[in-house]
Amino acid sequence: MRISWSFGAWRPVLWRLPGPGPFAGGSPRAERVVALTIDDAPMPDTTPRILEILKEYGARATFFLSGCRAGPHPELIAAIVADGHAVYAHGWDHIRLDHAGPERLIADMDRCERLLARYRPTPSPYLVRIPYNAGWRNRTVHRALTRWHPDSQIVHWNLSTEDHLIASRCRTEADVETECRRESDRVLADPRLAGAILLMHDQPIGDGPGASFKPMVGPTLLRQLLAGLIAGGYRTVPVTPRRSQPLWARYAMRW
């Protein structure tokens, strides 16, 4: 365990689903629940298929939407909300907001949330995941988030599907199924799965090797994961904010 110190700047950081306990920070290990978090949505060639798969399996997810993608596709924002999924801002442009400065961070988050607020009430507490989750241990970022939403909580993850790397390993459509299966089997076998916050992407931003396969990865991997979770007796839930933060946690962040 490591500790990062500040003069009262730290916002809560969630690695796992909050559970019972004096600080509401433990994980419900005995209960087979998983929180699916989906970054970088929405995309017209991916999001509708992802929503269909979630509905088919009766699954709930927490979406972190990128404004630059959501702006041109308001119908996809409406569809995600209509299906009952939790929706939060992922900034506007997919850049390192911890390097851009607090004013740009606040402006990007606010611009995206103003768009999302047309489709659902602004949540409180507000769950935050800025692009790349960059700055989750940066005091300046935490102070900026407090200025933007005093009740903000940063959502990290304790399990990643590493789906942003899958397309680069594919040369054929058959490779997508194989590489997704490799990652889904790894995640499903992980002993930390119960109570996990799981990182996925709608469609990772950026070009590179295998870019043409990116629209296939999210739906393929999601279907495999959900089938495995149900077979293992798991259910999916939205990320739950912490009920409270002890005073000392504003000064000392454990990770």
Image (tube, helix red, strand yellow):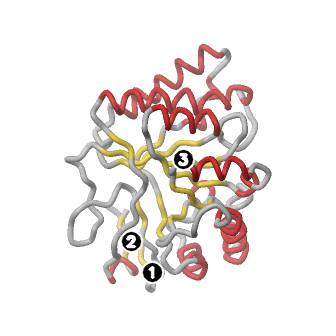
Report crowding for label 3: few under 14, some 14 to 19, many 20 or more residues within 10 A (C-alpha): some
Q: Return the mark for residue 253.
A: 2
Q: Residue furthest bottom?
A: 7
Quarter of the rendering occupied by the C terminus: bottom left
Q: What's the CA distance linking mark 1 and mark 2?
A: 8 Å
Q: Element type at marker 2?
A: strand
Q: Element type at marker 3?
A: loop
Name the residue: 47% across, 72% down. 125
1 and 2 marks in contact (CB < 8 Å): yes
- Please give the residue where the numbered disc 1 appears in the rendered image: 6
Quarter of the rendering occupied by the N terminus: bottom left
Q: Earlier in the sequence, mark 2 or mark 3?
A: 3
Tell us which disc is closer to us: 1 or 3.
3
- Please give the residue where the numbered disc 3 appears in the rendered image: 83
Residue 236: quadrant of the picture: top left
Report crowding for label 1: few under 14, some 14 to 19, many 20 or more residues within 10 A (C-alpha): few
Name the residue: 31% across, 49% down. 195
Q: Residue furthest front?
A: 82
